[in-house]
Image: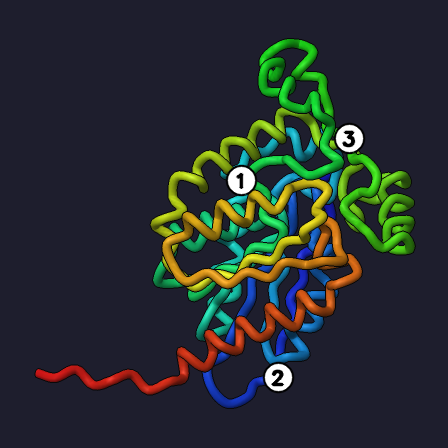
Amino acid sequence: MMPVDRSFLLRADEGAGPRVGMLLVHGLGGTPVEMKSLARSLRDAGTTVLACQLAGHCGTADDLRATRWEDWHASVEDGLARLEAECDIVVVGGLSMGGLLAARLAWAHPARVAGLVMLAPTLWYDGWSIPWYSFLLKLLIDTPVGQRFEFAERPPYGVKDERIRRLVLAAMQRGDSGNAGLLATPSQVIRQMWSLAALVKRILPAIRQPALLVHARQDDIAGLSNTLHLQRHLGGRVDVLVLEDSYHLVTVDRQRGLVSRRVAGFLEGLRDEAARPQPALVA
């Protein structure tokens, strides 16, 4: 049985100026539901939003294990084409590993993607909750032990807000992957993420669209070093927001409202730039 499609499209009321669309990409083993609060806020601020579901996600671990990062990227490509039919300007943004897919899409389509938003971007796992021995997985990945290994979610599950954390954990423990993602990620899937991250690190200087990076100082999964690396190596203008009261899942945690406002402001700036008259060329 194929996973239920949790993708959703929220259309904004048409106003003056260019129609702006935002493609949102969830994280590895995650679900579009983790983007819902942000999507609603952006829609209310005048942006049409499509939150796409990545191939193999919102189902079982075997569903996810059967995919490669190229399959996830194909889902993002489909989302871009769908949103282009609705909007004049498209910006792509992603959470965690979804931010890497967003960056890869911006690199592949510089004329079609006007801006990039990376939320808790994850090039490597170095947050404070990651076990010190996690580096051994790279050494053991091709052994029978490594093939059977699963990267289990650990407290605090990316969420600082205790009430929200309890809700997320309860859904994961029920096996409700469509709403809360998987409780454990197979090692083969982690390996695909490593391959994607290695590619994205190589192409960063060629990504020249304006970018907004949002990262929690206390991120439990991916340390602030990830955003500092991106800030240094992306090829275009980069704005950074560092959150002081959040963990990894910045779209659902305590400062989700601040995240929404900052992303909305970033989109408004791109809309204003697109609406500004261009100087005439002198023959």
The kind of secondary structure element at disc 1 is helix
Q: Which image quadrant: the N terminus?
A: top right
Find residue 261 and report its image quarter.
Answer: bottom right
In the image, is 144 to the left or to the right of 107?
right
Report, in whole angstroms, how far the alpha carbon at label 3 lies from the one at label 1.
Answer: 23 Å
Q: Give x and y (percent) for residue 140.
A: 62, 13
Q: Give x and y (percent) for residue 46.
A: 60, 80
Q: Give x and y (percent) for residue 218.
A: 72, 48
Query: Which labelled disc corresponds to residue 152?
Result: 3
The correct choice, above or below, for 20 with respect to 69 in the image is: below
In this view, the residue farthest toward the left is 283
Q: Which amino acid does the dot numbered 1 rest on?
A: Asp
Query: Along the line of sight, which residue is nearer the eye, 85 or 39?
Result: 39
The correct choice, above or below, for 42 with respect to 172 in the image is: below
Q: Tell me if residue 45 can be seen.
A: yes
Disc 1 target residue: 71
Disc 2 target residue: 13
Q: Which amino acid does the dot numbered 2 rest on?
A: Asp
